[in-house]
């Protein structure tokens, strides 16, 4: 008697929705055990987290502050993943976007008309993110260099470059030696909605809408989906895959760069420590959990942001390490990945069966004569 | 079966039947192997050779039938069981770990291995075996450093190291140079002289004559004949392998041939392994005719189709479609020049399984103004476009929104045909368009090809099914080892002569190419 995995004939919609939901439940249960081990009542802790993240308008605003960069980087990562391009470089692309926006705010505010400072920062920031993403994209498209390594390595360059800029050349001369640039002039501020929650939220929603339209209703999105599902078929019907990879990565990098712009012009209003706090990595979880659906990205990003803010809350309220939020994030991804296996396959118990189930399907067998 | 008969045979397979969903891969097949002999298992693609050998190796379990090894009835449940019985197989795609050495690969998977294997003893034994059988390989070499021929030797060494008595080789010569083939013959001779025996799977007649003592021919999953090699001839084997029955007759009018559409001149290309696959192929297909390419798999047909459709780089020669030169152009340029392509690998290349039937039908037309304007697609038009094709080509699907992977084989192919014929602007390249299809679907596909021809399309039909070529095409070109060895009008075609050309025997009259 053995247990075999069988590919499901049909993947139901219910399962697609169920997997992320059950993953969340699993992560919460797993987290409850950890909290118990730390000597804390898990229900009280979760209640405190919920209160801290969603309890009132101020809490929601703070959750949105964290959700906006996750939404934008999540959208960026999702479009790259559609092409099976494993962009781990959202963090670096975000940093470069922030860097470009900072330059605009500090050095181009005066010559530019007031109304145009923020738009110029947005455009240049997106451009910077796109350029940063284009480098690994070109290497992959034409030289087949593994993008997981290059995008990851480019992160360190970008993060250290940003750090160098606010420690060195761009440091505020009147900042009493604190690392960080001067406060941006008011014309370079992204408008805020409530508390620190800023207009980046609208940009994220617009980006998701555009992305959804592009994927579902344009030739380019159609090609992207084909190339992601079956690259051989894409080549066969005449799609230029290297060019498609580069275009997708330009969009991906631009969205991540936009996240950086929003951080510096909307939240910090200066460039300082705290720009690169891992949104670009959390974006990978966002993209996977949303199953690369743009609307799903917005939802999941908000959820994970709530988890982060709530994690901070229990640190303050119950004296727990803030890493608790991160642990829960990690606990989310594992059942997600495992769950998608069960969405595609099902377990079957076979009584002294043959080994065929382990082999490629029978349909392959009949053509294996060639 | 009598006791005396079984004792002298090393292996007997009796009444082996293996069914796959919708396919009877082996239908009561018998096979017998004696000590000290090389048995050739001959048949076309899909004849059931590999299935039969996979049964022997424990990869598949037969639905019916009995296997006896050295007179004892055995039940082979896994590759491990098969090894324990002294049966081992060299697969067509070698099962070696590239980043490990020869010696390490040989001990991989051995049972009762020490935590740190004594590789010195392994190497010593390998050298002994190498001397004994003429299989020279450096035990310390990494697999990636070895040529394909050497890798094959490692595979054989692996079996000999495990004291295998029955060696199965799946198309062992497909990847070898002529010199390496001679070496392999010598190795096999030495191996069987030791009282072992070998089965090799092939579809090349010359190799049967060169290698084997006896030959068992399969066709359509059934035994056709078993002969002593010395008592048969390539002609007889070709006839046995290809068969003569014709399924049905299609109405075929004489063709009205127009101007040349596809002109291929001195085309040269390499296969995936970097070896020459096309060696100066020249061919013309005119509007309103079907030119069939006959040949055994692996003689350059696939590469020819790929070069014409822009999927493979040509190292020499030219391809013209109409007045456009498309040599080494992108697949898109080839499509724009008027090339439609029914690919060999339907699911892997021709379709996107997880996308809907409608989207798959639109894979080419989405660029046209019929389905899009500027960058924007029109999903509703895509749906009506699909519905028209589903009706027109009688594709059985729950609806245009169904994921295409849930369609049956015949309907998958109809979907590809519908898309390609709809988009066709001059040339259709069809590769094995009916392989694996049932009789009804086969007939439909062939009728569609003929219809397309009558509408003035030039059709290049690549097939291993001689009946199909005789039935559908107007001229038949035979490919062997990357060359066209002869072109004959179908009315004058003689199946025996074509079979021989496919096997590499030159035709007696001058083989006109072009």
Image (cartoon, grey):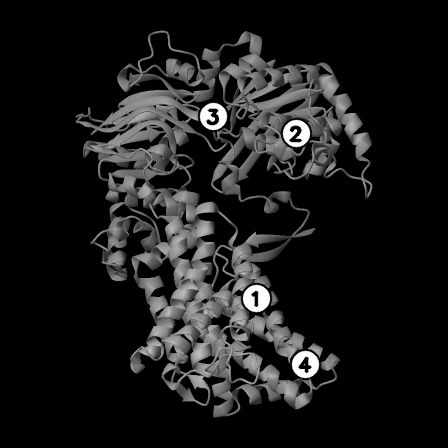
Quadrant position of residue B252: top left
Q: Nearer the viewer, mark 3 or mark 2?
A: 2
- Badge 3 or badge 2: first in the primary sequence: 3
Chain of the residue where label 2 is placed in the rendered structure: B
Cα separation between marks 2 and 4? 56 Å
Q: Is mark 2 on a helix, strand or loop?
A: helix
Q: Mark 2 points at which residue?
A: B155
The image shows residue B410 at horizontal and vertical percentages of 38, 42
Query: Residue B228, can we see it?
Result: no
Cα separation between marks 1 and 4? 24 Å
Callout 1 and callout 4 share a chain: yes
Callout 1 and callout 3 share a chain: no
Answer few, some or many: residues within 10 Å of disc 3's Cα (few below 14, many 20 plus, some between 14 and 19): many
The image shows residue B179 at horizontal and vertical percentages of 56, 16
Q: Is residue B149 left or right of residue B358?
A: right
Asked whether the beta carbons under mark 1 and mark 2 sit within 8 Å of each other, the answer is no
The residue sitting at 71% across, 85% down in the picture is: A40
Residue nearer the viewer, B261 or B1? B261
Cα separation between marks 1 and 3? 46 Å
Quadrant position of residue B62: top right
- Residue B5 lies, with reference to residue B63, above or below; the image says above
Chain of the residue where label 4 is placed in the rendered structure: A
| Label placed on residue B199 | none
| Label placed on residue B44 | 3
| Label placed on residue A321 | 4
The image shows residue A82 at horizontal and vertical percentages of 44, 59
Q: Mark 1 points at which residue?
A: A336
Q: Is mark 3 on a helix, strand or loop?
A: loop
């Amino acid at each position: 008697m053995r247990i075999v995995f069988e590919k499901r004939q049909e993947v139901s919609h219910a399962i697609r929705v169920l997997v992320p939901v059950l993953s969340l439940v699993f992560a919460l249960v797993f987290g409850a055990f950890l909290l118990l081990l730390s000597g804390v009542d898990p229900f009280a802790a979760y209640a405190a987290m919920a209160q801290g993240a969603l309890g009132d308008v101020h809490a929601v605003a703070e959750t949105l502050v964290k959700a906006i960069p996750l939404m934008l980087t999540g959208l960026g990562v999702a479009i790259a993943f559609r092409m099976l391009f494993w962009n781990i470089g959202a963090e670096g692309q975000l940093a470069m976007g922030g860097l470009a926006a900072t330059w605009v705010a500090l050095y181009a505010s005066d010559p530019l008309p007031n109304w145009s400072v923020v738009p110029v920062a947005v455009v240049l920031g997106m451009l910077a993110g796109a350029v940063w993403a284009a480098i690994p994209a070109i290497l992959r498209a034409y030289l087949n260099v593994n993008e997981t390594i290059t995008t990851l390595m480019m992160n360190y360059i970008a993060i250290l470059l940003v750090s160098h800029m606010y420690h060195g050349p761009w440091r505020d001369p009147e900042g009493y030696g604190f690392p960080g640039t001067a406060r941006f002039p008011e014309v370079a501020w992204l408008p805020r909605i409530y508390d620190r929650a800023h207009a980046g939220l609208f940009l994220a929603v617009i980006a998701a809408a555009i992305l959804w339209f592009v994927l579902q209703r344009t030739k380019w999105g159609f090609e992207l989906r084909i190339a992601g599902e079956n690259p051989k078929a894409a080549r066969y019907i005449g799609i230029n895959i290297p060019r498609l990879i580069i275009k997708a990565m330009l969009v991906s990098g631009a969205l991540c760069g936009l996240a950086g712009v929003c951080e510096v012009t909307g939240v910090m209003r200066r460039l300082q420590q705290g720009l690169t706090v891992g949104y670009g990595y959390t974006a990978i979880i966002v993209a996977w959990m949303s199953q690369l659906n743009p609307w799903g990205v917005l939802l999941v990003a908000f959820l994970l942001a709530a988890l982060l803010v709530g994690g901070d809350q229990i640190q303050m309220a119950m004296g727990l390490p803030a890493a608790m939020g991160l642990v829960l994030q990690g606990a989310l991804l594992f059942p997600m990945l495992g769950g998608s296996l069960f969405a595609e396959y099902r377990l079957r118990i076979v009584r002294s069966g043959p080994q065929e189930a382990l082999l490629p399907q029978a349909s392959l067998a009949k053509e294996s004569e060639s | 079966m009598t006791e005396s008969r079984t004792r002298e045979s090393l292996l007997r397979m009796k009444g082996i039947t293996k069914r796959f969903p919708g396919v009877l891969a082996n239908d009561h097949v018998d096979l017998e192997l004696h000590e000290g002999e090389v048995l050739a298992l001959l048949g076309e693609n899909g004849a059931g050779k590999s299935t039969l050998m996979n049964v022997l190796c424990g990869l598949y379990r037969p639905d019916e039938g009995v296997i006896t090894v050295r007179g004892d009835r055995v039940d082979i449940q896994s590759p491990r069981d098969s090894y324990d019985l002294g049966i081992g197989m060299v697969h067509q795609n070698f099962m070696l770990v590239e980043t490990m050495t020869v010696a390490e690969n040989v001990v991989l998977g051995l049972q009762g291995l020490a935590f740190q294997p004594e590789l010195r003893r392994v190497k010593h034994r390998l050298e002994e075996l190498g001397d004994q059988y003429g299989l020279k390989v450096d035990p310390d070499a990494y697999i990636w450093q070895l040529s394909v021929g050497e890798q094959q030797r490692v595979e054989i060494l692996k079996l000999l190291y495990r004291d295998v008595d029955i060696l199965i080789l799946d198309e062992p010569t497909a990847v070898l140079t002529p010199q390496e083939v001679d070496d392999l013959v010598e190795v096999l001779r030495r191996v069987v002289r030791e009282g072992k025996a070998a089965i090799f799977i092939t579809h090349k007649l010359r190799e049967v004559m060169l290698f084997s003592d006896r030959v068992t021919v399969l066709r359509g999953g059934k035994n056709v004949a078993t002969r002593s090699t010395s008592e048969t001839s390539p002609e007889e084997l070709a006839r046995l392998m290809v068969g003569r029955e014709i399924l049905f007759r299609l109405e075929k009018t004489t063709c009205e041939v127009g101007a040349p559409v596809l002109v291929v001149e001195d085309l040269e290309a390499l296969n995936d392994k970097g070896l020459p696959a096309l060696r100066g192929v020249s061919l013309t297909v005119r509007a309103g005719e079907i030119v069939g390419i006959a040949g055994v798999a692996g003689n350059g047909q696939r590469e020819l189709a790929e070069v014409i459709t822009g999927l493979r780089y040509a190292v020499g020669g030219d391809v013209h479609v109409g007045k456009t030169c498309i040599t080494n152009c992108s697949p898109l340029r080839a499509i724009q020049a008027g090339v439609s392509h029914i690919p060999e690998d339907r699911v892997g290349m021709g379709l996107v399984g997880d996308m809907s039937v409608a989207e798959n039908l639109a894979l080419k037309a989405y660029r046209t103004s019929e389905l899009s304007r500027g960058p924007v697609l029109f999903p509703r038009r895509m749906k009506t476009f699909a519905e028209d094709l589903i009706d027109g080509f009688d594709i059985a699907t729950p609806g245009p929104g169904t994921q295409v992977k849930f369609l049956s084989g015949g309907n998958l192919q109809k979907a590809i045909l519908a898309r390609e014929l709809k988009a066709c602007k001059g040339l259709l390249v069809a590769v094995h368009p009916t392989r694996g299809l049932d009789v009804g679907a086969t007939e439909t596909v062939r009728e569609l090809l003929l219809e397309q021809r009558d509408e003035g399309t030039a059709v290049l039909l690549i097939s291993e099914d001689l009946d199909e070529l005789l039935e559908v095409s107007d001229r038949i070109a035979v490919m062997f080892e990357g060359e066209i060895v002869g072109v004959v009008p179908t009315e004058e075609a003689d199946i025996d002569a074509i079979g021989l050309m496919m096997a590499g025997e030159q035709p007696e009259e001058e083989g006109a190419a072009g």
